[in-house]
Image: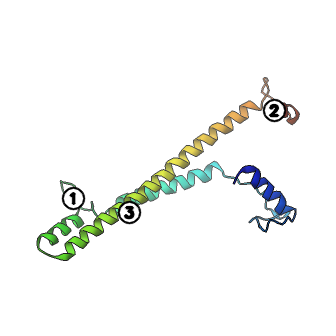
């Protein structure tokens, strides 16, 4: 959805238009604010930090293939699968398949957590830089805030 579509839907909905859509917000007079999406730097940092903590916890506690790994890096579950297969137990093959699938799924979740954490850290820094640039742009050469009438000249 493009930004202008969002603005159009907001105005149609607030005017009782016929879009058949209900925006999930309180009216301004009931503390609903402007209806615009607001994300604070602290919110981004908190979610990114939680994703990092989840990554660390999963990496440490969910790696059944590498848990109790020996010098060759083979985990106890993998060792058990190999021993069971060597002794003719069908359970060995099933355990080996389970370890492979578990490890694959674990890597996928770890990758997602790392992506979320890194992306939110990057977004937080990017927005802080954007805010600083915007703040610098709308000041006049003496450091005073430009009035809206002067700012609008830049967009004509």
Q: Where is residue 27 in the image (x, y as percent from the top left)?
A: 82, 64
Q: Name the residue rendered at 28%, 66% in the picture.
A: 99
> For residue 106, what is the image quadrant?
bottom left
Q: Mark 2 points at which residue?
A: 145
Q: Is residue 138 visible?
A: yes
> Circle 3: is it few (<14), some (14-19), or many (20+) Cα within 10 Å?
few
Dot 2 or dot 3: first in sequence order is: 3
| Element marked by disc 3 | helix
The tag on residue 74 is 1
> Does the image show residue 33?
no
Above or below, 2 relative to 149 = below
Pointer 2 and pointer 3: residues touching (CB < 8 Å)? no
Which secondary structure, mark 1? loop
Q: Mark 3 points at which residue?
A: 105
- Image quarter hosting the C terminus: top right
| x and y, in percent, of residue 25 in the image | 76, 64
Coloration of the structure image: rainbow
Q: Which of 148 and 105 is in front in this view?
A: 105
**Of 13 and 77, which appears nearest the observer?**
13
């Amino acid at each position: 959805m493009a930004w202008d579509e969002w603005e159009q839907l907001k105005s149609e909905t607030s005017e009782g238009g016929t879009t058949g859509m209900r925006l999930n917000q309180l009216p301004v007079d009931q503390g609903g604010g402007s209806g615009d999406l607001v994300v604070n730097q602290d919110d981004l940092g908190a979610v990114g930090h939680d994703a990092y903590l989840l990554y660390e916890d999963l990496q440490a506690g969910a790696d059944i293939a590498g848990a109790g790994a020996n010098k060759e890096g083979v985990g106890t579950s993998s060792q058990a699968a190999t021993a069971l297969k060597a002794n003719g137990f069908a359970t060995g093959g099933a355990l080996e398949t389970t370890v492979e699938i578990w490890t694959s799924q674990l890597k996928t979740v770890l990758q997602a957590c790392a992506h979320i954490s890194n992306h939110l850290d990057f977004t937080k820094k990017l927005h802080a830089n954007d805010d600083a640039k915007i703040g610098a742009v709308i000041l006049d050469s003496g450091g005073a805030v430009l009035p809206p009438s002067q700012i609008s000249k830049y967009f004509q």
